[in-house]
Amino acid sequence: MKVAVIGGGWAGIAAAVELTAAGAQTTLFEASRVLGGRARAISVDGRRLDNGQHILLGAYSQTLALMRRVGADPAQLFDRRPLQVVDNTGFRLALPKLPAPFNVAWGLLSADGVGLGEKLKTALWMDGIKRQGFQLPADTTVANWLDAAGQTGRLRRHLWEPLCLAALNVPAERASAQLFANVLRDSLGSSQREATDLLLPRVDLGRLLPEPAAHWLTGQGAELRMGTRVRQLAADENGIAIDGEHFAAAILATAPQHATQLWPALQLAYAYEPIATVYLQFAATTSQSFPLRNLLGQHGQWVVDRGDGLLACVLSGHGEWEKFSDAELAATLEAELGCAENATWRQVVREKRATFSAQPGLRRPGCATAQPQLFLAGDYTWADYPATLEGAVRSGLRAARLAYTRRPE
């Protein structure tokens, strides 16, 4: 069975691996010269950097399984640590290595700088959410959800709002409460303690999955057509024609706007959110007490310690920071960090359409289309999650399985 995958991001990679393992003759089309899409390695001034910061969780079961399948060992590639949320005000919430849900309960009750009354109120609220299966009566914004629950104290400012922005790439005032509840369900609300672990990459994104997957796919006989932009997609007899070449089925694993260009009947239209990463190089001895810190600055949000004195400051979602030039943005974040020394190297990487805007009531397509042999994959199609690598991987696996089982006789 000859199947095409259009788009070599993490969804397309997952689909291509699954198809190839099932015995399909797989062809992967990718317009870029490298795989990875919006989670890839880039080269700047002779350095390998990420085009954005992606912090994975232990709950990313399908992503971890896919890595192992193509020969990438998560135990070697990640620094796995129990979840901590720390910031520059002294707030700290750290989960111990206790069985779930005792790890979350202990972390909450031992959080620094939060009164006992607020902790107990939050614990009761979380227990109520869990009893409801993390299902809200109706979607609303995270801000409205927290207001209604009386979550207006220190934990809101130092825990819920930063986690919402990190997970959904949208501030609480605009973010979908149901999607945030889904994230909490599979992390803090999970029955598996390991689900809450932070997986901090020791290597760049290319070495996590795209490069091992490319090696595995070619070794298994799949064809990778890199630097190849698909121009035309059309239904033909018993399949799909891609620039005139016949395939029994095709999986569109591109961003929504590109999918609509190739197949206008989809009519996919979304608002998007940007992400900027400001890399600042300090002396090799410079480090953070914990690799991930909430900056809580006027503009800065999260800081990731990439080792050897390289700090990556993350800015998610639309904001005033978009008006700054790269030099202004780097100087602003450097000042907010408050390091005793000056950075010796600075680099800003911007993704203007990093994620779809995960707002309340967002309508999202599934995997199948009106054309029986054409399927969709991508984080925007995995409606249970916001734009995450795990959602992308799960969508790719789903599309591949459906495409293969619907093969023509």
Image (spheres, rainbow, N blue to C red):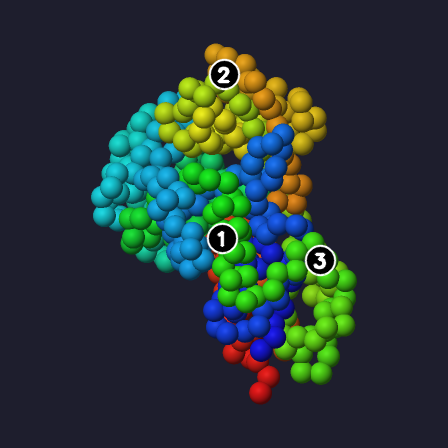
Badges 3 and 2: C-beta atoms under 8 Å apart?
A: no
> Residue at coordinates 38% horizontally, 33% vertically from top-left?
85
Mark toward the start of the polypeptide (3 vs 2): 3
Which residue in the structure is indicated by mark 1? 212
- Up the image or down, 244 lies above or below 134; here it is below
On the picture, is 364 further left or further right than 31? left
Which residue in the structure is indicated by mark 2? 338
* Secondary structure beneath label 2: loop
* Secondary structure beneath label 3: loop
How many angstroms separate mark 1 from mark 3 (CA)?
20 Å
Of marks 3 and 2, the one in the foreground: 3
- Of residues 378 and 115, which is closer to you in this image? 378
| Residue 93 in sight in this render | yes
Residue type beneath disc 3:
Thr
Mark toward the start of the polypeptide (2 vs 1): 1
> Residue at coordinates 76% horizontally, 68% vertically from top-left?
243
Residue type beneath disc 1:
Pro
Label 3, residues with CA under 10 Å away: few <14, some 14-19, many ≥20: some
Q: Residue furthest bottom?
A: 409
Of marks 2 and 1, the one in the foreground: 1
